């Protein structure tokens, strides 16, 4: 009887851990005071590369696994040119994103590089004229998104022996 109670408790705990939530949904805005990119929208272009000053708007969330999900169906990754790109394949995605002080936080910077097709986001500078931006997370009601650290708990398995 005691074993059954422990087993039920462990199963309930496992379900609760799986029920972690993503961040609040937010709009992506470029922040660099005094630049041409101040308050510009950020969205994937027709080549699925993140573009600043895009005519489109995107919504995003940081998942409980630390992935940056855009428009409910694509994940951010860094392509072979060091550009921030999006893919529907979660296997391509990079994790490690969070929200800190209402900005998207990641181990690499967000460098906007001016190209013929617009300002493309890179994970490193491409030229001295690049603009390092912050990506502000603005909620639907216009406020800043709260800090969000994804679930970084390491999953462990416990095997119980009968008493």
Image: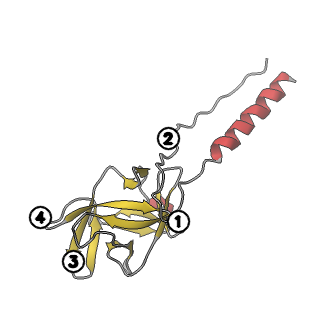
What is the secondary structure assignment of the residue under circle 2?
loop
Which residue is most to the left? 128
Q: Which residue is mark 3?
A: 115
Q: CA distance from mark 4 to mark 1?
A: 36 Å
* Residue 134, percent from left and from top: 31, 59
Q: Earlier in the sequence, mark 3 or mark 4?
A: 3
Q: Is residue 56 above or below residue 95?
A: below
Closer to the camera: disc 3 or disc 1?
1
Mark 1 lies on residue: 141
Q: Is residue 162 above or below residue 32?
A: above
Residue 156 in the image: state x and y as whole percent.
58, 33
**SS class of the residue under badge 4?**
loop
Alpha carbon of mark 2 to alpha carbon of mark 1: how far? 29 Å
Marks 3 and 4, how far apart in space?
14 Å
First of labels 3, 1 by sequence position: 3
Report which residue position mark 2 lands on: 152
Q: CA distance from mark 2 to mark 4?
A: 36 Å
Label 1 Cα neighbours within 10 Å, binned few <14 / some 14-19 / many ≥20: few
Identify the residue at horizontal 26%, vertical 66% (top origin): 81
Which comes before the other along the chain, label 2 or label 4?
Answer: 4
Residue drawn at 79 percent across, 34 percent down: 8
Residue 124 coordinates in the image, percent (x, y): 23, 59
Q: Point out the tag, 4 or 1, that comes first from the N-terminus.
A: 4
Determine the CA span between mark 3 and mark 1. 33 Å
**Callout 3: SS:** strand
Q: Nearer the viewer, residue 163 or 98?
A: 98
Q: Which residue is mark 4?
A: 128
Task: Work out whether mark 2 precedes mark 1 in sequence or the reverse, and give the earlier one.
Answer: 1
């Amino acid at each position: 009887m005691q074993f059954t109670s422990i087993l039920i408790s462990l199963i309930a705990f496992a379900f609760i851990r799986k029920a972690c939530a993503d961040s609040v949904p937010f709009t992506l805005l470029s922040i660099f005071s005094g630049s041409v990119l101040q308050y510009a929208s950020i969205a994937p272009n027709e080549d699925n590369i993140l573009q600043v000053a895009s005519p489109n708007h995107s919504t995003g969330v940081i998942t409980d696994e630390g992935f940056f999900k855009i428009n409910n169906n694509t994940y951010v990754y860094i392509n072979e040119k060091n550009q921030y790109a999006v893919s529907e394949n979660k296997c391509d995605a990079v994790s490690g994103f969070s929200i800190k002080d209402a900005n998207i936080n990641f181990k690499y910077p967000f460098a906007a590089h001016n190209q013929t097709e617009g300002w493309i986001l890179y994970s490193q500078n491409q030229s001295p004229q690049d603009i390092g931006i912050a990506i502000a997370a603005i909620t639907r009601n216009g406020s800043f998104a709260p800090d969000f650290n994804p679930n970084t708990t390491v999953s462990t398995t416990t095997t119980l022996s009968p008493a």
